[in-house]
Image: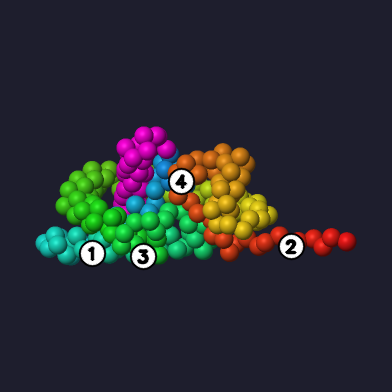
Amino acid sequence: MDLSLYFILFMIYSFFGWVMEIIFTLYKDKTLVNRGFLMGPYCPIYGSGCILIILLLNRYLKDPIVLFIMSMVICSILEYVVSFTLEKLFKARWWDYSDRKFNINGRICLETLIPFGLLGCLLMYVINPFISSLVLKIPSSILNIIAIILFIIFVIDNVVSFSIITKIHISTKDIIMDNTEEITKKVREYISKHSRFGKRLMKSFPRLKVLKEKYKKKPKKNKK
């Protein structure tokens, strides 16, 4: 029962995160973009952050200041780890805060930490009690079925998305350039042309940067 409940909450908050990203992008860039690393309407990093806060910070409900600080810590660690992991897997930086003040390796920055703390408090005091009470009204048998169906969809989405991205990743190995920005430009062009999902991915992560060390210089041919 608990496992089904937490997974459904994970999916709900992943969806909320996806909606929040779309609204933010629409406000900032005046364009509607299907945000997210996967094909479905969800951003798992938000769902993961929410579940971690729910599981780890319930003991701090009586101390909002500690809850606020701990929410910032948990979310910043999660964002840093996800950024580092994706970079190691695909040799690309999916988001970059290097141009913002008080950032750590461009993976996290103070500008995003404060909203994390506020959202953590809002989650624990308002959102999660309300959402959890609604979900718990569903009979356990039906809840388990819903959780299984969502889990299957989520796993398939992950497998398909990673498969497509890996193929794109392998295909771009032959792109030879000397400058990181030029590499990124060529890779983005290649992905947009060769993959429908890749085209959406480029819109979802406009700050995508491909790391230079992945590519080798093309050896010069000796003229006879």
Q: Name the residue under label 2.
A: 219
> Which residue is most to the right?
224
Whether pointer 2 and pointer 4 mark residues with C-beta atoms closer than 8 Å, the reply is no
Q: Earlier in the sequence, mark 3 or mark 1?
A: 1
Q: What stretch is highlighted in magenta?
A: 4-33
Name the residue rendered at 57%, 61% in the picture. Answer: 212
Dot 4, crowdedness within 10 Å: few (<14), some or many (≥20)? few
What amino acid is at disc 2? Pro
Q: Nearer the viewer, mark 2 or mark 1?
A: 2
Would you identify the image quadrant in which residue 25 lies? top left
What amino acid is at disc 4? Pro
Q: Which of marks 2 and 4 is in front?
A: 2
Pick whichever, 91 or 119, lies toward us: 91
Whether pointer 2 and pointer 1 mark residues with C-beta atoms closer than 8 Å, the reply is no
Q: Earlier in the sequence, mark 2 or mark 1?
A: 1
- Compared to 73, does 209 lie above or below? above
